[in-house]
Image (spheres, rainbow, N blue to C red):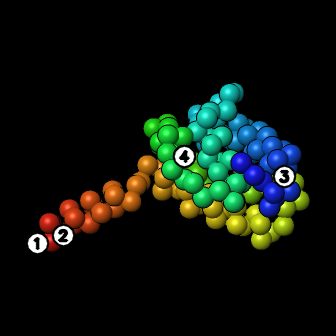
Amino acid sequence: MTYERIGGEAIANAALDDFFQRAQEDDLLAHLVGPVISPGVRAFMAAALDLDNNDEARLTPALAWLSEEGLEDDDLDHMVGHLVLALEARGLDDDLTAEIADRAEALRDAALGVWPEDDDEDEDEEDEVAA
């Protein structure tokens, strides 16, 4: 992974450490991150920070794990919010922070276990009901 756009691996690691501390102290996220950071949360946040890597297929197992753990929309909102605060604390500019937050949001459906083929099935079911 490269983190050149955010200032390098040291900045990424500091932001992740800050994020994990914030998340561990958040009652809403405590069941997801716990005292030992889960591989799913780590992979999700690393993917959000790695702006130059668009290979989301490698994240499927980690994102599925998050979904299995009961990740809700509110959980992901808090995760993204803590990431933004961690990035701001590292001095990242607003545009880059917004881009990272947007990337994390783009992973929302995958993290919540909603896959594109699920949407097609729902549309097919709606069409059958309408007929």
Camera-side residue: 90 or 71? 90
Badge 3 is on which residue? 8
Which label belongs to residue 131? 1
Q: Are marks 4 and 2 in contact (CB under 8 Å)?
A: no
**Residue in the picture at 53% in, 56% down:** 108
- Spatial CA span between label 3 and label 1: 56 Å
Which label belongs to residue 32? none
Badge 3: how crowded within 10 Å, few (<14), some, or many (20+)?
few
**Please, what secondary structure does the residue beneath circle 1 have?**
loop
- Horizontal placement of 16 versus 90: left or right? left
Residue type at mark 1? Answer: Ala
Corner quadrant of residue 14: top right
- Spatial CA span between label 2 and label 3: 49 Å
- Spatial CA span between label 3 and label 4: 22 Å
Q: Are marks 3 and 4 in contact (CB under 8 Å)?
A: no
Badge 4 is on which residue? 58
Quadrant containing the C terminus is: bottom left
2 or 3: mark nearer the eye:
3
Camera-side residue: 61 or 30? 61
Image spot of residue 64 (x, y percent):
47, 42
Q: How many marks?
A: 4
**Residue in the picture at 64% in, 51% down:** 47
Q: Earlier in the sequence, mark 4 or mark 2?
A: 4
- Spatial CA span between label 4 and label 2: 33 Å
**Residue in the picture at 55% in, 46% down:** 59
Q: Earlier in the sequence, mark 2 or mark 3?
A: 3
